[in-house]
Amino acid sequence: MRLPLFGDLWNAQSWIEQAFWLAAAVSTLLLAILLVLSLFSPERDADEEADKKLSHIFNARTVLNFFAAFSWMALILYHQGMPMKVLLAFSLAVGLAVAALAKAATLLFLRLIPHRSHDEGERLLLQKGKVLEPIPPHRNGFGKVHLDLRGAPYELEAITAGKELRPGAEIRVIGVIDERILLVEPLEDEGYPHEQAFGSRG
């Protein structure tokens, strides 16, 4: 008994079905590669996505989501014997809906996770918050502070150059170290100790 080869199966299909299979296979493969690459550099991928404006919605991920959803839905409907006009219209609607939902889910996810680029570090400056865990004095250790960023609360590591900061103390951010650690001071503080000493000399 001779088993059908891939070439036989491929040639037995119409050119329309072949086109749908090619679009589905290529878009799904590229989407999987893009997902794997984003897993190796999630912070950079998130920063690039967050910096995009709404007018730049047609990025690679959105286009691939559309073509993958469109082509797979077209294949399903084609095997169901649906008329071509209805098939194309319904597949187009499904592709657009999936692409829009995927984009919305990505933007929602980015709003829920704290990520800091160079620009984000600048935006953190002078932000106010409260101490959650004690911060040792004179940069001798790390504590945690609470900030309200993008309308959502975040807990971030912090150090201070002055006296110890206890839980509940109000603070402001005066620096970002290595894009990960916040340098904070008491909200009522008028400056670093070395700044006060320098001013007294003048």
Image (cartoon, helix red, strand yellow):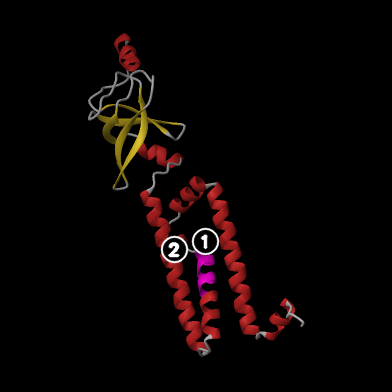
* Total number of numbered discs in the rendering: 2
Residue 76, placed above or below residue 124: below
Q: Residue at x 54, y 52 (%)?
A: 38
Answer with mark 1 or mark 2, whichever residue precedes in sequence. Answer: 1
Q: Is residue 128 visible?
A: yes
Find out whether residue 65 is within the magenta segment: yes
Q: Residue at x 51, y 90 (%)?
A: 83
* Residue 179 percent across, percent down from the top left: 45, 35
* Residue 57 percent across, percent down from the top left: 46, 62
The single residue placed furthest to the right in the displayed view is 2
Residue 202, placed above or below residue 31: above
Q: Amino acid at mark 2?
A: Ala
Label 1 sits on residue: 61
Q: Is residue 112 rendered to the left or right of residue 59? A: left
Residue 83, placed above or below residue 65: below
Residue interval drawn in magenta: 60-70
Marking on residue 199: none
Q: Main secondary structure of the magenta part?
A: helix
Residue 192, placed above or below residue 149: above
Check the picture and name the quadrant holding the C terminus: top left
Q: Is residue 95 rendered to the left or right of residue 167? A: right
Q: Amino acid at mark 1?
A: Arg
* Residue 59 percent across, percent down from the top left: 51, 61
Q: Is residue 26 rendered to the left or right of residue 102? A: right
Q: Residue at x 43, y 51 (%)?
A: 50
Contact? badges 1 and 2 (CB < 8 Å): yes
Marking on residue 102: 2
Graded by Cα atoms within 10 Å as few (under 14), some (14 to 19) or many (20 or more), the crowding at tag 1 reads some
Graded by Cα atoms within 10 Å as few (under 14), some (14 to 19) or many (20 or more), the crowding at tag 2 reads some
Q: The residue tagged with tag 2: helix, strand or loop?
A: helix
* Residue 30 percent across, percent down from the top left: 60, 62
Q: Hey, which quadrant is residue 124 in on the image?
A: top left
